[in-house]
Amino acid sequence: MSDHQPERSPLAASKLGFFPAVMFHSRWLQLPLYLGLIVAQGVYVVQFWSELIHLVEAAFGNEQALQLLVKSVGYRAEILADGGQLKLNETIVMLAVLGLIDVVMISNLLIMVIVGGYETFVSRLKLEGHPDQPEWLDHVNASVLKVKLATAIIGISSIHLLKTFINANNIEVKVLIWQTVIHVAFLLSALAIAATDRLLAHGHSDKG
């Protein structure tokens, strides 16, 4: 007697009972959530260009843009002796650029959640053969998505920590300590997720 099981036709596979069909199609309730994240990414684009314009204007001597830039990066710039004018310095530029990088990395995180989450939990995007298909999307699943998200969060946390260290003179010691502790916690969490995913992958391969 053959162990080969006949494959179910697409028509047969599509005939679900009422409750299984409701539960299966309920995945489309996530669609408004992903559309909302796209809107949130648009807000980040506006924020990025607003900060960039302030930085460029401050570089050309716009006092108001410099004030807004200093306020946004949380830097307590000292009033210089020559005329009491606030001037753009390397620290302010570095903090502003790190803020722009932070926005880009969060935007990348949003793309991973939107594209990867939709592909994994809602429906196929059918990007096979498309020249712009992300390389990681070929083998995306819930486990891979978790590891990638954890890695992205560590990158964002690293940028925040670097900004804090650069601006350490204006930040309380307990804030520095807690940000470092939280960053280490993110690192340990990512390592734990990666190790768990590896163990599960080995378990599946052993059963196969």
Image: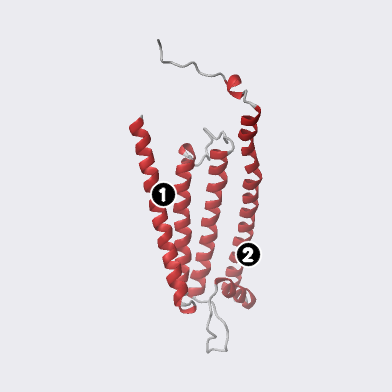
Q: Residues within 10 Å of mark 1 (few under 14, many from 20)?
A: some
Q: Nearer the viewer, residue 37 or 195?
A: 195
- SS at circle 2: helix
Residue at the (50%, 18%) spot, across then down:
7
Using the rendered view, name the quadrant where residue 123 is placed. top right
- SS at circle 1: helix
Q: Nearer the viewer, residue 80 or 15?
A: 15
Check the image and name the residue furthest to the top.
1
Residue 49's x, y, as percent? Answer: 61, 61
Q: Nearer the viewer, residue 72 or 2?
A: 2
| Dot 1 amino acid type | Ile
Residue at the (54%, 35%) spot, across then down:
130
Check the image and name the residue furthest to the left.
206
Tell me if 21 is positioned left or right of 95 in this view: right
Q: Which residue is mark 2?
A: 50
The answer to whether one can see residue 120 in this image is yes
Residue at the (58%, 71%) spot, across then down:
72
| Dot 2 amino acid type | Ser
Residue 23's x, y, as percent? Answer: 62, 35
Q: Which residue is mark 1?
A: 193
The answer to whether one can see residue 60 in this image is no
Q: Cα distance, mark 2 to mark 1?
A: 36 Å
